[in-house]
Image: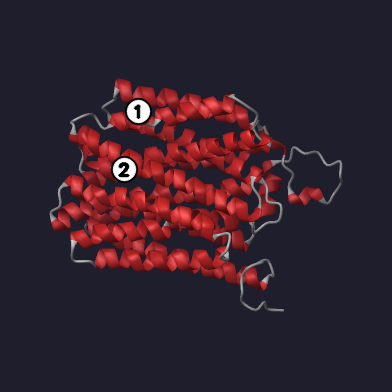
Amino acid sequence: MMLFNQVRLTLIAFFSYMVMSGLLTQAGVILNAVAATLQLPPAVAVSMFSWLTGGVLVGTCVSMYLYTRFSLKYLLVLTYSGLLILLLVLGVIMPQSYSAVAAIFWLLGLACGCGLSGGAVIISKIYQAQRRASAFIATDCAFSAAGYLFPTLAGWLLAQHYPWQYSYLAVGGIALLILIFVLSGDCPQAHESRSPLLQGNSRNTVAHNSAWLQFRSIVNVRVVCMALAVCSYLIAQTSFLTWAPSYLSVAFGLSPDAAGQVVGNYWGASIFGLLLSVALVNVVPTRWLLICASMMAIGLTFSMVSSGSGEMFISLGFAFGFLTTCIYKVAISLGTQQIPNAPPMLVTLMLFSGSVGSTIAPAISGVVVAASNEQGALWLSVCCYLLMALLFIVTLVSENKKGQSGDWPLKRVT
């Protein structure tokens, strides 16, 4: 029975990432369709997705408080019930105005942010140490699977002249499965976690800690650097996948269907890369894995942007997805290890920093494209990957000097 319950909870976490992926990864495929619906140029219409990612940002921010105060099961039921209602409004009523679609996108993002934080808290509660790293990477397999499925579905639906909203409506099936699993059993009591600041005071310390005390307990230089690195990673990834199809169409004259393959190639290959990473984190130090994947991200994005062939660009997309998508979850896993007995707020802080990156990426890349061209957004990604790698190195060297690392092979400074 315990095994069944752990499988059920793990599936809830995995599906929460699939819902997020289903809503976010379609951006590059449906961008032109959304622009046509709103009667705006793509460089302006891309800001619509900032409403979606902005909602995710607010949702993960609010979750840092909610999951310290309320039942995880109650919050998940409320979150995914609301998300289903919003998807029905978007897919059935099909609002055409910018303000209406923006409001729905923002609320969908809010629900996704809360739900994703709930899935991350579940993983942090039922898995420990290296298994937690494996579980976090495995959730990205679910994200990548949805990242392949839903953009492919969106491209097919658009080719069949169906509205772009239909591919979003399909995401509701995953949300419905989450509700069924949540209601079929109990969930961990995340809101009863103790802060490390209070553990040494008394064995009778009240379990319900304030959000402020938990926040104080997790703030240090290494945590801040890891959070900024995660933010930079999401800016790079989101900007690249949003504008790569448009760049291929403009620069090499590829059809929209052919150009959109780069998104599917990235997410499809990432499934196998993440499965390999799940095995690697059990035999290779996670810090080495993070640095190597970061260097590969820099090299591959530079090669793709510098490539003079659309076919080469698309082919490199397989390697890009296979070798680099483990970065996000490895970074989150290492971020949560920077504080002993880390409270749930540390997990949601890492997710919050990622949400900041995905929120500002469409706006920043839109400004860059308006000032230059589609290739400018891809060079922005290269720069953000460079910044990310620098922050990782600073964090891990600092960690080594503090004697915090168990698998960092450099000699510690005394």
Q: How many marks?
A: 2
Q: Position of residue 410 (x, y in %)?
A: 61, 77
Name the element at disc 1: helix
Which disc is residue 116 wearing? none
- Characterize the local packing of mark 1: few (<14), some (14-19) or many (20 or more) Cα atoms within 10 angstroms: some
Snapshot quadrant of residue 225? bottom right
Quadrant of the frame with the N terminus: top right
Q: Position of residue 29 (x, y in %)?
A: 26, 43
Snapshot quadrant of residue 207? top right
Q: Residue at x 35, y 33 (%)?
A: 102
The amino acid type of the residue labelled 2 equals: Ala
Q: Is residue 367 left or right of residue 56?
A: left
Q: Is residue 6 left or right of residue 257?
A: right
Callout 2 touching callout 1 (CB < 8 Å): no
Which residue ends up furthest to the top in the rendered image? Answer: 93
Name the element at disc 2: helix
Q: In the displayed structure, would residue 111 be above or below residue 395? A: above
Q: Position of residue 226 (x, y in %)?
A: 55, 59
Can you identify the residue that label 1 sits on? 169
What is the spatial separation of the Cα atoms under label 2 and label 1, in whole angstroms? 15 Å
In this orientation, which residue lies closer to the viewer: 274 or 242?
Answer: 274
Q: Residue at x 30, y 51 (%)?
A: 265
In this orientation, which residue lies closer to the viewer: 265 or 358?
Answer: 265
Is any part of residue 113 visible from this angle? no
Q: Position of residue 255 (x, y in %)?
A: 15, 48
Please identify, in this view, whether the residue under mark 2 or under mark 1 is nearer the observer: 1
Q: Residue at x 44, y 58 (%)?
A: 232
Q: Is residue 228 left or right of residue 250?
A: right
The amino acid type of the residue labelled 1 equals: Leu
Can you identify the residue that label 2 sits on? 27
In this orientation, which residue lies closer to the viewer: 194 or 124?
Answer: 124
